[in-house]
C-alpha cells in the first residue's frame, strides 16, 4: 500500500509504531546500501516526526524551564502520553484542529516593541520542536557558517566573537553596517518558503504539514500598510533615496565661493 493511502486511524497504537519503525528502518538500509550517502532530498519525514521517541523528546524540549509559569503545560502533563498519541495521529493523517493564534507585545531592553504571534502548547509547540528535531540538521547545513542567533552554540556571543575576529584580521576595513528589516518574518512570501523546502525535501505530505503548522498565519494587508507608511516616513525625514552632495564638496572648485550651498543665517540684532 502506498504511504499516502495508509489508513492510520484503523490501526492500533502498536501497529502504528511497528509500521513507522519498518519504514524508518527501510530508509536507513537504503542509505547504507548506497554507501552511507544520503539522498539529496529526504523522504519519510512524517514517519520520523511521528515516532514516539521523537515526540517525547520534543515535548521535553518544548517545556524546558516553562512548567511553573505556563498552565497549559501543567494541564498537558496530567495526560502527556495520550496527548502525544493524539499528536502522532494528527501528523500521520494531517488532520489538525483549526489554528488558534494569539498576539503578545514584548518590549526589549532597548525599548523596541515586538509583536509575537504564538500558538497553544498542545499540539502546536510540541509539533514545532518535533519538526526541528527531524529537519533541523538539514536546514542548518544549508546556512553559511557565520549565521547566528536562535541556533544552539551560535548565539549572540558567537556573532560578536566572529565580528571582532574579522576586524582584527582585516584592519583596513574600519566600518561595518548594522541593519534591521521591519516586519521581516511577517512579510516573507509563503511561496518562497515552500519552494525552498521542496528543494531539500521530496515528501509532499511534509510540505502540507508546514503549510498547516507554520504558514497558516496570514499577516494580511496590515503589514503592507505598515511598510508603506515606513517608506513615506523616511522620505519625509531625510534624503534617504536621493544622493545630494554636501556644500563642502564645492569649496575646492575654482570660481566657487566657499559659502555656496550654505543656508544663510540671520545675524543677531546686537551685531547689526
Image (cartoon, rainbow, N blue to C red):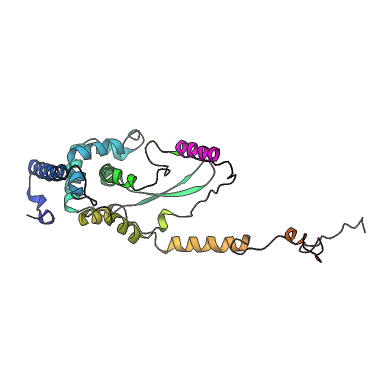
The extreme bottom residue here reads 255
Asked whether, in this view, residue 199 is left or right of residue 181, the answer is: left
Q: Residue at x 36, y 59 (%)?
A: 218
Along the viewing direction, whichever of 159 and 166 lies nearer the viewer: 166
> Is residue 159 in the magenta section?
yes
Asked whether, in this view, residue 90 is left or right of residue 226, the answer is: left
Residue 62: % across, % down: 30, 39
Residue 239: % across, % down: 63, 62
Q: Residue at x 13, y 56 (%)?
A: 4
Q: Quadrant of residue 149?
A: top left
Asked whether, in this view, residue 209 is left or right of residue 164, the answer is: left
Give the prevailing secondary structure in the magenta stretch: helix
Residue 76: % across, % down: 25, 39
Q: Quadrant of residue 208?
A: bottom left
Indicate the quadrant containing the C terminus: top left, top right, bottom left or bottom right. Answer: bottom right
Q: Residue at x 90, y 58 (%)?
A: 269
> Is residue 230 in the magenta section?
no
Q: Is residue 122 above or below residue 256?
A: above
Along the viewing direction, whichever of 39 and 259 lies nearer the viewer: 39
Asked whether, in this view, residue 9 is left or right of residue 134, the answer is: left
Q: Tell me if residue 141 can be seen.
A: yes
Residue 150: % across, % down: 39, 42
Indicate the quadrant containing the N terminus: top left, top right, bottom left or bottom right. Answer: bottom left
Q: Tell me if residue 79 can be seen.
A: no
Instruction: Count the marks.
Output: 0
Magenta stretch, residue numbers: 156-173
Amino acid at each position: 500500500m502506498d504511504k499516502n493511502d495508509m489508513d492510520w486511524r484503523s490501526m492500533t497504537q502498536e501497529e502504528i509504531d511497528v509500521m513507522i519503525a519498518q519504514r524508518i528502518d527501510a530508509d536507513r538500509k537504503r542509505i547504507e546500501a548506497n554507501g552511507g550517502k544520503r539522498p539529496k532530498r529526504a523522504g519519510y519525514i512524517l514517519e520520523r516526526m511521528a515516532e514516539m521517541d521523537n515526540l517525547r523528546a520534543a515535548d521535553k524540549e518544548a517545556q524546558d524551564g516553562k512548567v511553573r509559569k505556563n498552565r497549559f503545560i501543567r494541564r498537558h502533563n496530567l495526560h502527556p502520553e495520550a496527548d502525544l498519541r493524539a499528536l502522532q495521529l494528527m501528523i500521520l493523517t494531517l488532520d489538525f484542529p483549526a489554528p488558534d493564534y494569539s498576539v503578545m507585545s514584548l518590549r526589549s531592553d532597548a525599548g523596541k516593541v515586538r509583536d509575537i504571534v504564538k500558538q497553544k502548547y498542545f499540539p502546536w509547540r510540541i509539533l514545532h520542536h518535533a519538526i526541528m528535531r527531524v529537519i533541523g540538521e538539514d536546514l542548518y547545513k544549508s546556512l553559511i557558517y557565520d549565521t547566528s542567533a536562535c541556533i544552539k552554540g551560535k548565539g549572540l556571543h558567537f556573532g560578536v566573537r566572529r565580528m571582532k575576529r574579522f576586524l582584527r584580521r582585516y584592519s583596513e576595513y574600519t566600518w561595518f553596517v548594522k541593519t534591521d528589516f521591519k516586519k521581516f518574518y511577517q512579510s516573507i512570501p509563503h511561496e518562497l518558503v515552500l519552494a525552498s523546502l521542496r528543494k531539500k525535501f521530496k515528501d509532499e505530505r511534509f510540505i502540507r504539514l508546514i503549510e498547516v503548522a507554520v504558514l497558516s498565519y496570514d499577516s494580511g494587508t496590515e503589514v503592507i500598510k505598515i511598510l508603506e507608511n515606513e517608506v513615506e516616513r523616511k522620505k519625509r525625514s531625510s534624503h534617504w533615496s536621493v544622493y545630494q552632495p554636501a556644500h563642502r564638496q564645492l569649496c575646492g572648485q575654482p570660481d566657487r565661493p566657499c559659502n555656496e550651498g550654505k543656508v544663510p543665517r540671520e545675524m543677531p540684532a546686537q551685531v547689526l
